[in-house]
Amino acid sequence: MSSVDPRELRNAFGEFTTGVTLVTTVGADGKAIGMTANSFSSVSLEPPMILWCIDKGSDRLSTFEESEHFAINVLAANHQDLSNRFAKKGEPFMDGVAHEIWETGCPVIADAVAIFDCDVAARHDAGDHIIYVGLVRRFGRSDNPEGPLVFHKGGYKSVS
Ligand SMILES: Cc1cc2nc3c(=O)[nH]c(=O)nc-3n(C[C@H](O)[C@H](O)[C@H](O)COP(=O)(O)O)c2cc1C
């Protein structure tokens, strides 16, 4: 048993300012889903690798487990509605969201500030989360003038 207080730990984690991503994939039924995540990190340049973490309690985990691909969309400041929508339980589907399809078949948001279209390179068990490591098949950046969506202490922040 850990003596760490989870609420205090969450608050301490929240001191680390992050961007916000929409992670997408396509289930075995062919339906695309999205999930808001700020656990994204760059990992390796050669080969090109990134990671993100998913809660084992997520209703969306089974869909990510079915797929060998995902796409990371680094959201812009004008994507707050998207972030909120895909952080809600029971609303995982990408219906009605304008998107493109790149190499892996996962939806990508054209005006995201950055996109990483990935094959699943590894899944690592890590406490109450699973670390997904992605091998980047294709990436891109947009010149969205809004700049990035920023998350700090449990809320959205502006960098401008
Ligand atoms: C800014 C933000 C960042 C989040 N980051 C993560 C994350 O990195 N990993 C994760 O599993 N859930 C994360 N969540 C929570 C999921 O978005 C949320 O649990 C999920 O989309 C809805 O629940 P479900 O997965 O059980 O359907 C985040 C939520 C917000 C608002």
Image: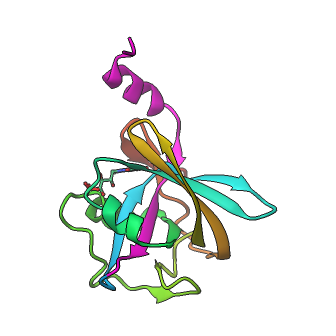
Image-based side of 133 in relation to 26, left or right: right
Q: Does the magenta stretch include residue 22?
A: yes
Q: Give the range drawn in magenta.
A: 1-28
Residue 5 to residue 134: above or below = above
Residue 83 to residue 58: above or below = below
Image-based side of 150 in relation to 34, left or right: right
Residue 40 location in percent, x, y?
54, 53
Q: Which of 146 and 67 is in front in this view?
A: 67
Residue at the far left in the pictured view: 90
Residue at the far right in the pictured view: 46
Residue name at image x 59 percent, y 71 percent: 118
Residue 102 location in percent, x, y?
56, 87
Q: Nearer the viewer, residue 95 or 154?
A: 95
Image-based side of 56 in relation to 38, left or right: left
Q: Which colour scheme is used?
A: rainbow
Residue name at image x 42 percent, y 71 percent: 24
Q: In which quarter of the image is the N terminus?
A: top left
